Image (cartoon, rainbow, N blue to C red):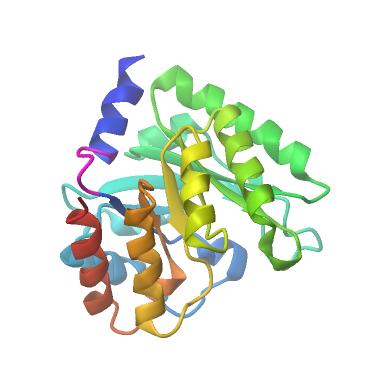
Amino acid sequence: MYGKTIRLKRIFPDERRRLFSVPLDHSVSLGPIDGLEDVPALVDELQTAGLDMVIVTKGAVGSLVPVLRPPTLLGIHVSASTTLAPNSNLKVLVGTAEEAAALGADLLSIQVNFGVPEESEMLRYLGIAADQCRSIGLPLMCMTYVKKPGGGTADEIRHACRAAADTGADIVKTGYPGSFEEFRRLVRTTPVPLLLGAGPRLDPDSEFLRIVRETIEARAAGVCIGRNLFQRHPVGPLARQVASLLHGAA
């Protein structure tokens, strides 16, 4: 189907630049954490700084209608759980590809946590979402995490990313595998575009920017970074540095 190919070209229009995407779906799992008090104002500031794509829950789309402006892309995240539950690692589907497309999405996002007892159930959800996206031509991103002590080994992260891609994800987001060499190897062994998520806040800013530079050097497709940006106040100055690095990538 041509629709998915066309949308993926919009997301990755030029090999000389990397995608700057920011997920803002954390309020479902973690509540109204620092930085997400006013999402429309945050998105407006990020767009001014050079954001390419924002990823939100389907319930948050309405609040963004007044501020979302071209060429910013919209991703809608439809996996959910909360830290109030005893099995918060189990992410269930709370929306469909059709709903996301009706809301104006350029991409559907789900999450799979590997290495937990509920892994097989989440893989089933990934398969369902992949079939839905294929039928309407919507790209699917899988936020891919190994939920083991220490975040999983580099081998486990590599396995999880390959499994997500081979189960139907068009784009894979995951965490840093521990070293630049492992990062480069991860990019090579994942057969779809790979986005880096930085996880909890890295300090100082220079450490965070080092990871962004490694994203470019490892030839990953870009970043999908939330708390390391929106929990810095003001967010604009650092976001502009990230955009400058990613969009000027050789």
Q: Residue at x 65, y 34 (%)?
A: 125
Image coordinates for residue 61, horizontal then vertical, percent: 37, 52
Question: Which of the pair 195/216 is nearer the observer?
Answer: 216
Image coordinates for residue 135, horizontal then vertical, percent: 46, 18
Image coordinates for residue 189, horizontal then vertical, percent: 53, 37
Q: Quadrant of the N terminus?
A: top left
Q: Is any part of residue 235 visible from this angle?
A: yes
Image coordinates for residue 55, horizontal then vertical, percent: 40, 52
| Numbered disc total | 0
Is residue 13 located in the magenta-colored stretch of the structure? yes
Residue at the extreme front of the image, as rendered:
181
Question: Which of the pair 118/185 is nearer the observer?
Answer: 185
Question: Could you say which quadrant of the image residue 243 lies in?
Answer: bottom left
Is residue 143 located in the magenta-colored stretch of the structure? no
Could you tell whether 129 is left or right of 98 in the image? right
Q: Residue at x 33, y 59 (%)?
A: 63
Q: Is residue 40 above or below residue 13?
A: below
Question: Which of the pair 170/79 is nearer the observer?
Answer: 170
Q: Is any part of residue 38 visible from this angle?
A: no
Q: Is residue 75 above or below residue 129?
A: below
Dominant secondary-structure state across the stretch colored magenta: loop
Q: Residue at x 75, y 60 (%)?
A: 148
Question: Could you say which quadrant of the image residue 177 lies in?
Answer: bottom right
Question: Could you say which quadrant of the image residue 66 lies in?
Answer: bottom left
**Which span is picked out in magenta?**
12-17
Could you tell whether 176 is left or right of 23 in the image? right
Question: Which of the pair 101/152 is nearer the observer?
Answer: 152
